Image: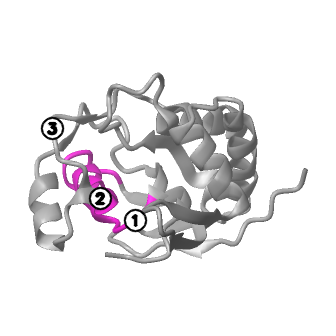
């Protein structure tokens, strides 16, 4: 089965960023208070992985992401894939880390889970409307353990791009504390609206 993607450019304080596609095509509020949501093909795969814990989707998503990554001019210069640390620790598994590991296997890049750590508990950003409040919430939330990627190019990876605040904060930490030369960003999907 061929999965179509529609590359989305991600704007932030990183060098270059991409999402493979939008997450949803449309979402309508129904009279019973639920939503009728139409997702992109890869958005549906990600939804099944993240919310229905369907690990069988990892292989397909990772294959698509790996193929895409190999088409980027920066690909030969990347030294690692750094997944965004999880904020919800009670999941049966961590989708972002699992995807990053599988993508890393496919493109032969290390995925060190011990490098970038979350050191401060934060509220779910999707519940915070105000941009400044989100920035305040994230300040000091992440640290790097060492300078093993000083002067290197790395890929920062997340599953869903919403406002970009988390990725901006982590990019700051990678550059200022980790002395990373350049940060590139890849997410599987992006929301239609940016808050």
Label annotation for residue 162: 1
Label 2 or label 3, whichever lies nearer to me, is 2
**Residue 20, can we see it?**
no
User: Looking at the picture, does residue 74 appear above or below residue 54?
Assistant: below
Label 3 neighbour load within 10 Å: few <14, some 14-19, many 20+ = few
Locate the C terminus and report the quarter of the image it occupies: bottom left
Seen from this angle, which residue lies furthest right?
1
Which of the two labelled residues, at mark 1 and mark 3, occupies the earlier sequence position? Answer: 3
The answer to whether residue 141 is left or right of residue 89 is left
Closer to the camera in the image, 149 or 35: 35
**Residue 133, can we see it?**
yes
Task: Report the Cα–Cα distance between label 1 and label 3.
Answer: 19 Å
Quadrant assignment, res 48: top right
Closer to the camera in the image, 56 or 70: 56
What segment carries the magenta color? Answer: 161-180
Which of the two labelled residues, at mark 1 and mark 2, occupies the earlier sequence position? Answer: 2
Residue 102: % across, % down: 64, 33
Label annotation for residue 190: none
Seen from this angle, which residue lies furthest front?
32
Label 1 or label 2, whichever lies nearer to me, is 2
Residue at 28%, 53% (x, y): give it: 170
Tell me whether circle 1 and circle 2 mark residues in contact (CB < 8 Å). Answer: yes
The stretch drawn in magenta includes residue 176? yes
Q: Secondary structure at mark 2?
A: helix
Residue at 46%, 62% (x, y): give it: 32
Query: Dot 2 corresponds to which residue?
Result: 126
Label annotation for residue 121: 3
The answer to whether residue 139 is left or right of residue 142 is left
Residue at 34%, 25% (x, y): give it: 90
Q: Secondary structure at mark 1?
A: loop
Residue at 33%, 32% (x, y): give it: 115
């Amino acid at each position: 089965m061929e999965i179509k993607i529609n590359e989305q450019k991600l704007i932030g304080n990183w060098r270059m960023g991409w999402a493979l596609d939008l997450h949803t095509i449309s979402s309508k509020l129904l009279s019973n208070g639920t939503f009728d949501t139409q997702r992109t093909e890869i958005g549906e795969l990600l939804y099944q992985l993240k919310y229905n814990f369907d690990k069988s989707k990892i292989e397909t998503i990772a294959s698509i992401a790996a193929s895409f990554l190999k088409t980027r001019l920066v690909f030969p210069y990347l030294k690692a894939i750094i997944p965004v640390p999880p904020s919800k620790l009670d999941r049966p598994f961590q989708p972002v880390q699992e995807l990053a590991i599988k993508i890393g296997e496919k493109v032969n890049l290390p995925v060190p889970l011990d490098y970038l750590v979350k050191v401060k508990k934060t509220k779910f950003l999707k519940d915070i409307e105000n941009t400044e409040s989100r920035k305040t919430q994230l300040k000091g939330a992440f640290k790097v353990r060492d300078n093993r990627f000083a002067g290197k190019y790395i890929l920062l990876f997340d599953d869903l791009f919403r406002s970009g605040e988390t990725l901006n904060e982590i990019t700051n930490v990678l550059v200022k504390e980790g002395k990373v030369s350049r940060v590139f960003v890849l997410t599987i999907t992006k929301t239609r609206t940016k808050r």
